[in-house]
Each structure stands twice: as structure tokens, then as C-alpha cells.
Amino acid sequence: IYTTIPTHDKHIIVVGGGLAGLSATIEILKRGDTYVTLIEKEKRLGGNSAKSSSGINAAETIIQDKLNINDSIETFINDIYKSSKEEADMDKITYLAQHSSDAIDFLLSMNINLDLLSQCGGHTSSRTHRNYNAPNTRPMNIGWHIISTLVKHLNSTYTIHANNANEEEKKPLL
């Protein structure tokens, strides 16, 4: 359990310390009128997001525009639907595709470089966003890079307390 110092009347609990939970925590704290308790069942934050190695799929992003990659929300929806063997919930995949560029914008606002685009399986356009590896380095796990960057942002911007069972101490999230 991680919590910011309770300096406000509003309190929100976020369950899960993966990409969605960390993003929600950051967005809530940006408002400045709420303190947050982030609950994670594992010893480390990140969840399955930290293990993601291919990247984040999104359509009609500023990066695609910058690289002159022709893609659309409609094409993204169709690709997902075909990949699901036409069993996916259209409302859910439509929502996902329509808001996918917002996720990229958020990560870019956190200074996460996602300038490398790939066309992965099931896609008809290059829409898997990741970053380049530095020359002569091991391949980067983009999921871990994203999670660790968000955690560093939280640690450097807010006062975080980690509560472990019966003891409470101030320590970094990772």
C-alpha cells in the first residue's frame, strides 16, 4: 500500500499498480486537491505492464502523423475485430481505439519516448509505439521502461509513504 500525505479532504483509493493504476494515480494527484492510496498486491509495482515487450498500440497519434503513417480509428477497430475471430465486443474495441491516442499523449507528457513504430501481427498499419534502444545496448523492455519512468515521476514529484503490513516507512516506490 502506497499513499501520499493526507493533506486534503478528498481521498481516492486506486487498486493495482500497473500502467492503468499508476496513470490514474498521477492524473488524480495532478489535480492537487486529493490524496491517494495505491494498493498493489505484489511486492513491486508494474503488474503485467512491466513485462510488456512489444509496445503500445494506438491509431491517429501525433507520432504516426509526424512519421507520415496513414492509419485510422476505423482500421484499428477492424484489425482488432478480425484478430478476435469476430468475437470481440464492438463497443469496447471502439472505445479502446477511439481513446488510444490519449494514452500515447499521456506517456509523451511523462517524457517517455515512443518514436519507433512497428507493424506487429494482426495490424494493417504501423501502430505499435515503442522507443529506440541506445546504440550498443541490450534491447529495452518498453513496459518496464514506462513503469519505471512513471514511478520515478511519482517519487520525484510527490511524497510517498509505503505501508508494509504493520510498519510504515517513507521509501521510494521501486
Image: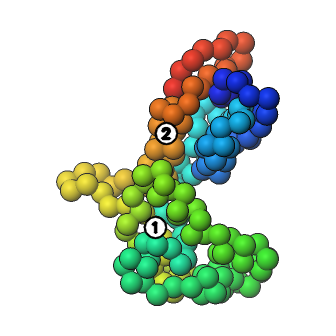
* Residue type pointed to by label 1: His
Residue 97 point in image, percent of width and height:
65, 75
Name the residue rendered at 52%, 62% in the picture: 105
Residue 55 point in image, percent of width and height:
48, 63
Residue 153: mark: 2
| Disc 1, SS | strand
Name the residue rendered at 49%, 39% in the picture: 153
Residue 87 in which image quadrant: bottom right
**Badge 1 density bin: few <14, some 14–19, many ≥20, Cα 10 Å:** many
Location of the N terminus (image quadrant): top right
Residue 10: mark: none
Residue 58 in which image quadrant: bottom right
Q: Which residue is mark 1?
A: 129
The type of colouring in the image is rainbow
Residue 116 point in image, percent of width and height:
37, 68
- Is 134 on the left-hand or right-hand side of 14? left
Name the residue rendered at 74%, 85% in the picture: 86
Q: Viewer-proximal residue, 81 or 14?
A: 14
The relative height of residue 81 versus residue 151 in the rendered view (above or below) is below
Residue 77 point in image, percent of width and height:
66, 82
Mark 1 or 2, closer to the camera:
2
Task: State which tag comes first along the sequence, 1 or 2.
Answer: 1
The relative height of residue 115 versus residue 7 in the rendered view (above or below) is below
| Disc 2, SS | helix
**Could you give the CA–CA distance between mark 1 and mark 2, rounded to whole angstroms?**
21 Å
- Is 73 on the left-hand or right-hand side of 108? right
* Residue type pointed to by label 2: His
Residue 125 visible from this viewpoint: yes
- Is 85 on the left-hand or right-hand side of 101? right
